[in-house]
Image: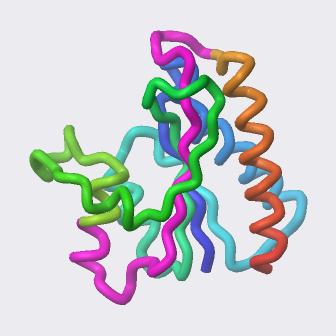
Amino acid sequence: MLTIIGCGNLNRSDDAVGVVISQKLQRFLVEHHVSNVRVYDCGTAGIEVMFQARGSEKLIIIDACSTNSSPGTIFEVPGEELENLPTPSYNLHDFRWDHALAAGRKIFKKNFPQEVIVYLIEAKNLELGLELTPPIQKAAVVVLEKLKKQVLNWS
């Protein structure tokens, strides 16, 4: 099973990119009837990422980032590079997807994806807003097309 999870906040402009991509990918799956692939919009619920990933062979997470790189820069990062980040706590208000990777592996052990890839897209605007900025729209198309190919190859 391949699980793809989009994360972000639809009310914070470019932070929504993971959610937007996951929603478009869900529509793609309906049109193409691909089996053994699940796509979720987990918004900002890190704990949901952990539970939706359980039982998958491969997990892909999509989210925005803010690293002072050029807006629209796409980073493809192995999950293990991010799951080892120090976590201040495991309360539900601070539990993000990067925490979900570390906690999920610890809790679910072999029933958690061994292969995790994270696509991060450098945001331009994280203020309140309902639209992606143009550079993030372009990057979203690139990531979406890449994911469509992976989905079709998975089946």
Q: In this view, does 105 lie to the left or right of 79?
A: left
Query: Is 54 included in the stretch rendered in magenta?
Result: no
- Location of the N terminus by quadrant is bottom right
Q: Is residue 135 left or right of residue 17?
A: right
Residue displayed at 47% across by 18% down:
126
Residue displayed at 38% across by 61% down:
81
Which one is in front, 50 or 148? 148
Residue extending farthest to the top is 128
Q: Give the range drawn in magenta.
A: 103-130
In the image, residue 76 lies at what x, y percent?
58, 54
Residue extending farthest to the front is 69
In the image, residue 123 lies at what x, y percent?
54, 25
Which one is in front, 148 or 51? 148
Which one is in front, 90 or 120? 120
Query: Is 113 included in the stretch rendered in magenta?
Result: yes
Relative height, residue 139 to residue 60 (above, below)? above
In the image, residue 21 lies at what x, y percent?
68, 42
- Location of the C terminus by quadrant is bottom right
Residue extending farthest to the right is 31
Residue extending farthest to the bottom is 110
Residue displayed at 65% across by 47% down:
22
Q: In the rendered picture of this protein, how many numbered marks are placed on residues? A: 0
Residue displayed at 27% across by 55% down:
99
* Colour scheme employed for the rendering of this structure: rainbow
Relative height, residue 74 to residue 49 (above, below)? above
Q: In this view, does 101 lie to the left or right of 7?
A: left
